[in-house]
Image (cartoon, rainbow, N blue to C red):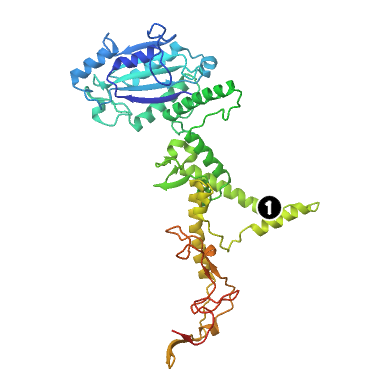
Amino acid sequence: MATFKHISSKNADYGAAEQYLTFEHDEFTMKPTLDGNGRLVPRDDYRIASLNCGGEDFAIACMRSNLKYGKNQKREDVKSHHYIISFDPRDAADNGLSVDRAQQLGEQFCKEHFPGHQALVCTHPDGHNHSGNIHVHIVINSLRIAEVPLLPYMERPADTREGCKHRCTDAAMEYFKAEVMEMCHRENLYQIDLLNGSKNRVTEREYWAKRKGQAALDKENASLAATGEPPKLTKFETDKEKLRRTIRAALSSAVSFEDFSGKLLQQGVTVKESRGRLSYLTPDRTKPITARKLGDDFDRAAVLEKLTINAQNAARVAEIPAPKEEYSRSIKDRLQLNKAAINAPKQDSIQRMVDREAKRAEGKGIGYDRWAAVHILKQMAATMSISKEKAFVDETNKVCICVEETEEGFFLKTNLYDYMPEMQNKVITTEMLGMAFEPEQKFENPDGSPIVFDEDYYGNAHGKMPKAGPFEEPGMLKV
């Protein structure tokens, strides 16, 4: 299961690379480990070799070449490239991989793929996670000191010229990973597919964040144990791990992308799609996390495939008839079923609006608030849809509206109420109207008291089922 990693460095101190490879360093601060006398502690076991340095020290040879060609003199210049080939811990016991053999493979890999570069090749028998994985460090000067043949990963003529710099492009990384896989196959070593990504993609930053977080949590649990208190948590999770768990929980039951988005929104996570790629925004961030940084299980293709499978499974379940009950349900079960049937909203009905301000006062979080905003918009759209579907249209009778002048004044005369159907309307109140969308405020009187529209335009009292419109009583209406 060999892995391949690349790190570019702008550090002008080339000796720091050799110091890291040959002396112990703190795995969190990356500072050298000192003994009781303040001296550096050498590593117990390692193999190291320099290439193309002309018998000189690696650092001196690199600085001499940089001065000769006038390269790597600016602070922002990439001075060196650090490549790491990490072998599977099982290779030592199962496949006979030794530190000396890994060093030979590393030197051969460096000569074939980084010709013309001054390089350090160093092999360590174990990593900082103490899993027993033999790994090879290849550190090269970014400057090329000799003309080299055109290799498959090189794209420009300058990539072969003397005095030009090494470029680690995406195409180059793909090529190097393929070569590492071929090397493992040739040596009969364990290997995974490095070219097609991984279900969970853990970056270097996330890896160290988890290591440091777990160390801090272990220290806190130790202090709690000393006082006799039980630990609250034993395993530290990064923000990305929590996000992956939330997405997988939503994917496990969602049957459509809208359903998937709604389930994530209830947890405070907003999913966005841009140019065919998904990204996820958590409540504590302003910049979304792309699916590429989470892993292949969270990109658009994998999500849609999972949703399709869920929808097909749900359709199969719906087609299977429910088995006939051998025994009658208990009274408690029947009451629960009746209660669920009564409380379940009808498909063509409009659900109540949510008072977002009141819910915030109750302590609801930003995730619930986002869900409530979307819920209100959906109910507004449903209201418009049902209003159009159930609107009364009379294409037979002719409705007349006119204004007549009499000795008592002007009166509005209409036969509209003669043709209006009986409708089950309710008295409009502040509670029924809910919250206004833009200001997110209730419809109230100027003094803040609730509104009850129990009278018509002329002050006539509405009945239990008031007529639609501003007038309760038809006839001659004074203007």
Q: Is residue 216 above or below residue 305?
A: above
Q: Nearer the viewer, residue 243 or 275?
A: 243
Q: Looking at the rendering, in which quadrant would you find the C terminus?
A: bottom left
Q: Residue, x 42% and y 29% (percent of image)?
A: 205
Q: Is residue 31 above or below residue 6?
A: above
Q: Quadrant of residue 280?
A: top left
Q: For the residue labelled by badge 1, is the local secondary structure a helix, a strand or a loop?
A: loop
x, y (%) of residue 168? Answer: 32, 28
Q: Amino acid at mark 1?
A: Ile
x, y (%) of residue 400? Answer: 47, 86
Q: Quadrant of residue 120?
A: top left
Q: How many marks are shown on the rendered structure? A: 1
Residue occupied by mark 1 = 320
Q: Nearer the viewer, residue 69 or 154?
A: 69
x, y (%) of residue 461? Answer: 56, 77
Q: Quadrant of residue 61?
A: top left
Report the side of 351 relative to 271 (left or right).
right
Q: Nearer the viewer, residue 352 or 75?
A: 352
Residue furthest out toward the bottom: 407
x, y (%) of residue 106? Answer: 39, 17
Residue furthest out toward the front: 447
Residue furthest out toward the top: 37
Q: Is residue 460 above or below residue 304?
A: below
Q: Residue, x 46% and y 43% (percent of image)?
A: 283
